Amino acid sequence: MTTATTTRPLVFLALPQDGAARLATQFFLAIAGTLLLTLSAKTRVVLGPVDISMQTLAVFLIAAAFGMRLGVATLLLYMAEGAMGFPVFQGTPEKGIGIAYMLGSTGGYLAGFVVMAAIVGWAADRGWDRHPIKLFNAMLVAEVIMMAMGFAWLALLIGPEKSWQFGVVPFIVGDLIKVALAACLVPAVWSLLKRS
């Protein structure tokens, strides 16, 4: 009989053992994660008709460092902040806020971020965050699923051809670079920790 090997992601090295202190620290980390997601959403590079943010990189790093449970909880908290009208998303408040914004053109991508965090966090929980190739593969799968969700939702709004042209193609190269960067950064941190 085989069982899945579960290891601890990076953040668990810093968590206290005491139950109340551990919970408080996890809550603080989730809040800090939502702040990082907000900053990454507002950090953007304008390339033609679309803006490319650092948000997917932030999702990758949070999920790999936090693991699946805390990573997904952080993304759900971020979505809740956006649903309540806080200007945490890339186009807020300029293009609307709250649920109305979330159901707009970026809705599929936002939902995809939660799935992305689950996939990468699951991989980190199994020790893949220590191996660049394994982590790259998990992040690539997560990226493809997130883009597929974004494409599908956008296609309902503007049609598949425009959705592909404006919602997928402009992001391919940039997102592949972010996948590679995140897949190298997290194992590099583990290597540094082993040496110290």
Image: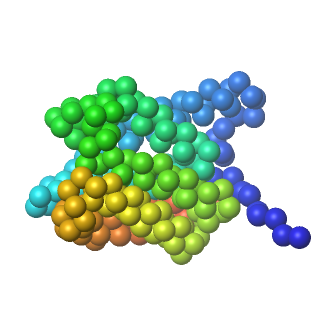
Tell me the quarter of the picture where residue 168 sits: bottom left
Residue 96, how many percent across, how many down? Answer: 21, 33
Instruction: Looking at this view, name the residue that lies furthest to the right.
Output: 1
Q: Position of residue 131 (x, y in %)?
A: 59, 70
Q: Residue at x 75, y 34 (%)?
A: 17
Spot the residue most to the bottom.
133
| Quadrant where the image shows the N terminus | bottom right
Observer-nearest of 39 and 105: 105
109 horizontally vs 70: left or right: left
x then y, percent, for residue 59: 44, 51
Observer-nearest of 164 and 130? 164
Residue at image position (42%, 48%) is: 111
**Considering the image in quadrants, where does the C terminus appear?**
bottom right
- Compared across the picture, whether 176 is left or right of 165 comes to right
Report the colour scheme. Answer: rainbow
What is the quadrant of residue 27 in the picture?
Answer: top right
Residue 45: x %, y % from top left = 19, 55
Residue 137 located left or right of residue 107: right
Q: Is residue 57 visible?
A: no
Numbered disc total: 0
Q: Residue at x 62, y 66 (%)?
A: 128
Can residue 18 be seen? Answer: yes
* Residue positioned most to the left: 48
Residue at 33 percent across and 65 percent down: it is 175
Q: Is residue 176 above or below residue 92?
A: below
